[in-house]
Image (cartoon, rainbow, N blue to C red):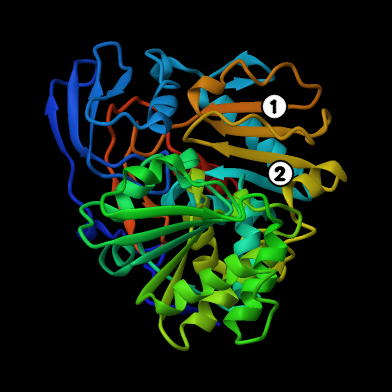
Amino acid sequence: MHDSSSTPSNAGDAGAAHAPVPSFSGAATGSPATTHDWTCPFCPLLCDDISIDLRGDNTLAASNTDCPRLARSIAHFSATAATCRPSVDGQDTDLESALARAGEILSRARRPLFGGLATDVAGARALYELAARCGAILDHLHGDALFASTLALQDRGAFFTTLSEVRSRADLLIVFGCQPSARYPRFYERALRGLARPLGVCFVACEADPAASALPNASVDSILPQADPFDVLAVWSALAEGRRIESGKHAEIADLAQRVASSSYTVVVYEPAALPGPHAALLVEALNRIVKAVNRTTRAGGLALGGDDGALTVSQAVTWLSGFALRTRVSMRAPLDYDPYRYRTQTLLAGGEADALLWVASFVPQPLPDALGADVPAIVLGHPSMAGTLGTRRAPTVFIPVATPGVDSGGHLFRIDATVVAPLRAARHAQLPGVAEIAGRLAAARSQP
């Protein structure tokens, strides 16, 4: 069951009509230039109002925003990225040799794992085809957070909302167990920009986010910042279902429930990755259940903050292509096998159940998992700054630098509310192959007799 006030786009929909087309001014590649209305690929908010400057040395700077997450991300793009070469076992080589070695690793693997998966729609589609030809398991870098939301949705359903509905309808924002600006610095600006009506913002089971105080016409408060989130949701769920509680003992939660009942549109904001494990799915399910109960008498919706590093994009694409969520083993010769517990990256690697790893990290450098055994072959389709960081491994290791969508190539990503597929425009055009190209070439090689 999936109740939603908006119908998400599918992975084949570019969504270009819903986002501004960036404009480019300046000289050719390698000369100073500025891309206006550029969409930032480093955060699932996909802010599309940025002016990104390409300096003469091929480094980048944002001239009209001070977003710290963007600043940290573009700092990884050095002037020498375009000259980064593939490597095999720590030795520089050419692309053809690296592809041949990667193909050998995949051909010998009987249970390969495709992990990281930090890529865009095209990369996800190409990796899925390659995985099907290899009989590989697919899991994302942020698979634990995705699993919490997916399991809750599968079990009980959910009412989701969108950034546009938050901006146009919400009169009460309940933020549960997180401070959004810590990970998504422009969240309030993107969700509530231009808001003129009064807005209540209540932080539950956490301290108030200092950034929320800058919201116009907003009253900000926090309740039960040190409380156990499971206890808070147990009482709140009982109240939402109309059950009796000891009002004196739980007065603050009772007041919260009354605020929700008297509001015209409540939005419950949470970060699956910030919820305490290993049972975060139970908290997400409880939040979903509360939102559903509220909708019997008034309006409410949930907004999960997540999908970083292409996680939401890859999840949407894989589900659309296979009918299953991530943590599925796909094959052209056997039935699909979905097992979100058994096919967790950490579990597979720690148990020695994967005999090869293909690791994808195209947005920012992401180290190989700590649980990866020294004797397990690895193929890394990674950010150029990962060159030389893989160390000397006992097992065969192939590194192929790839383009970053939105920086070195175009692409598409799903926005944080899963309703818009935003087009990305390259800011500098470094001559690097994309994940889709590399995965496509590896898949084509496996299809040959």
The structure residue drawn at horizontal position 41% and vertical position 34%, both measured from the top left corner, is: 404
- Please tell me in which quadrant of the rendered image residue 7 appears: bottom left
Which residue is depicted at the point 54% across and 83% down? 293
Residue 131 image offset from top left, x and y in percent: 62, 53
Image x and y of residue 141, in percent:
62, 44
In the picture shown, does residue 9 fall above or below 431?
A: below
- Nearest the viewer among 70 and 197 is 197
Q: Quadrant for residue 368, please give it.
A: top right
**Amino acid type assigned to the residue bearing label 1 in the image:** Thr
Disc 2 marks which residue?
Answer: 107
> Disc 1, disc 2: CB below 8 Å?
no
19 and 432: which is toward the camera: 19
Q: Residue at x 67, y 72 (%)?
A: 235
Q: Earlier in the sequence, mark 1 or mark 2?
A: 2
In the rendered structure, which amino acid carries the disc numbered 2?
Ser
Q: Is residue 223 left or right of residue 352?
A: left
x and y percentages locating residue 322 in the rendered image: 57, 68
Measured as percent of width and height from the top left, residue 312 is found at 49, 55
The reply, left or right, for residue 377 in relation to residue 17 is right
Q: Which residue was labeled with disc 1?
A: 397
Disc 1 to disc 2, C-alpha distance: 15 Å
Q: Secondary structure at mark 2?
A: helix
Q: Secondary structure at mark 1?
A: strand
